[in-house]
Image (cartoon, coloured by chain):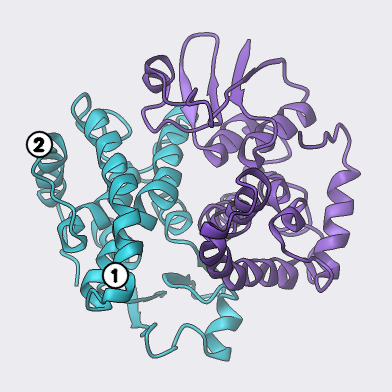
Chain colours: A purple, B cyan
Amino acid sequence: MLKIYGDVNSGNCYKIKLLAEQLQLDYQWLDVDILAGESHTAEFLSKNPNGKIPLVEFADGRVLAESNAILCYLAEGSDLLPNDIWQRAQILQWLFFEQYSHEPNIATSRYIMRYLGNPASHQQKLAERREPGYNALKVMEKQLSQHEYLAGAEYSIADIALYAYTHVAEEGGFSLARFPAIQQWLARLAAQPNHVTIG
Amino acid sequence: MLKIYGDVNSGNCYKIKLLAEQLQLDYQWLDVDILAGESHTAEFLSKNPNGKIPLVEFADGRVLAESNAILCYLAEGSDLLPNDIWQRAQILQWLFFEQYSHEPNIATSRYIMRYLGNPASHQQKLAERREPGYNALKVMEKQLSQHEYLAGAEYSIADIALYAYTHVAEEGGFSLARFPAIQQWLARLAAQPNHVTIG
């Protein structure tokens, strides 16, 4: 059976849980407590030398890291990752946007505010992430004001990847009030069959 | 003809140039000066609302952003992106590793030291990137001490993506002296047919 190593409150891990539920995959969830160092034990590092979660392990022992690479692999053959190479290119564009322009600003702000307790020592880091985080939301708003889903007319793993941290962006101090298309898209995502919440 | 919008000194842009040369694609290179604001003109933003390079534009007007999504699309059908889905998963894992764990530390350090002139105001940012940057190099070293290329036995776009900023890591203050497998891999990459240098 597929094993998913993760933290239920991490958006990157939640992506995999959401996809696995929507595809109705059989899986076992194994909690990894990063703050307790569980992603840096010798055993975990033998599976992922980068010491990060999520990580998936297949019955034959193969392992795969990087949340968005896992989404691509698990969604292969499903409607959430169409075969058309141009559609795939659009989806990948959004997946890389998520990891480079969205997650480092929006997820990191949430981490500082919610998990580190918003300490004075991190206020400059938080402030620096505000503008690029809102820029990422503006890019999404523009696309979602013209299309139902990020990669166009169809729901895909691009939506799952961006939903993960966007729907909890307010926990990182980002207001979604100015982004009506994002709000409608969030509601559309939450209404998908087999949707599960984070946490 | 394929248009590539980029900056010849940017590793993210160089990836696309290197791939285009190795695949012997016909293309037109269009210089975009980020520091002069050329990636934030109304015209450029109409092509890429995220205001980033590289960007490719096809003869029919379609555009694609995100360097690693562009690599995947352009390499489709070539030996640099095999069809096997597990091999693709490994390649994608390295591409996401590059954008999340490698580029923000190693490329950003190079940017601070080489392009911003290593100002006093940025020394803390530089210091914070040292350990995670070296960790990324350690992850590569481990893989390359066991395999010829990042995704295994065959040269792929994962190597092109990681080569871009690794071969100029010393410009960001990272010494490769402790990484013999990376050094051998860099030499192997530079010896590929139709290799071109950055800049």
Taking the spot 83% from the left edge, 54% from the top edge, the residue there is A186
Element assignment for label 2? helix
Taking the spot 85% from the left edge, 61% from the top edge, the residue there is A183
- Disc 2: which chain? B
The residue nearer to you, when weighing B114 against B99, is B114
Label 1 and label 2: CA atoms lie apart by 25 Å
Q: Which mark is residue B111?
A: 1
| Residue A173 image-quadrant placement | bottom right
The residue nearer to you, when weighing A179 against B186, is A179
Q: Which numbered disc, 1 or 2, marks the residue that appears first in the sequence?
A: 1
Residue B73 on image: x %, y %: 47, 54
The residue nearer to you, when weighing A5 against B18, is A5
Seen in the image, is A132 located left or right of residue A9?
left
Q: Amino acid at mark 2?
A: Pro
| Residue B136 image-quadrant placement | top left
Point out the image quarter for the N terminus of chain B: bottom left
Residue A16 on image: x %, y %: 66, 32
Above or below: residue A195 compared with residue B12: above
Taking the spot 52% from the left edge, 67% from the top edge, the residue there is A124
Residue B9 on image: x %, y %: 25, 73
Q: Amino acid at mark 1?
A: Tyr
The residue nearer to you, when weighing B130 against A97, is B130
Residue B139 on image: x %, y %: 30, 34
For label 2, count other residues whose C-alpha is less than 10 Å away and answer few (under 14), some (14-19) or many (20+). few
Q: Which residue is mark 2?
A: B180
Taking the spot 44% from the left edge, 19% from the top edge, the residue there is A44
Element assignment for label 1? helix
- Disc 1: which chain? B
Q: Note whether residue B16 is visible.
A: no
Q: Are marks 1 and 2 on the same chain?
A: yes
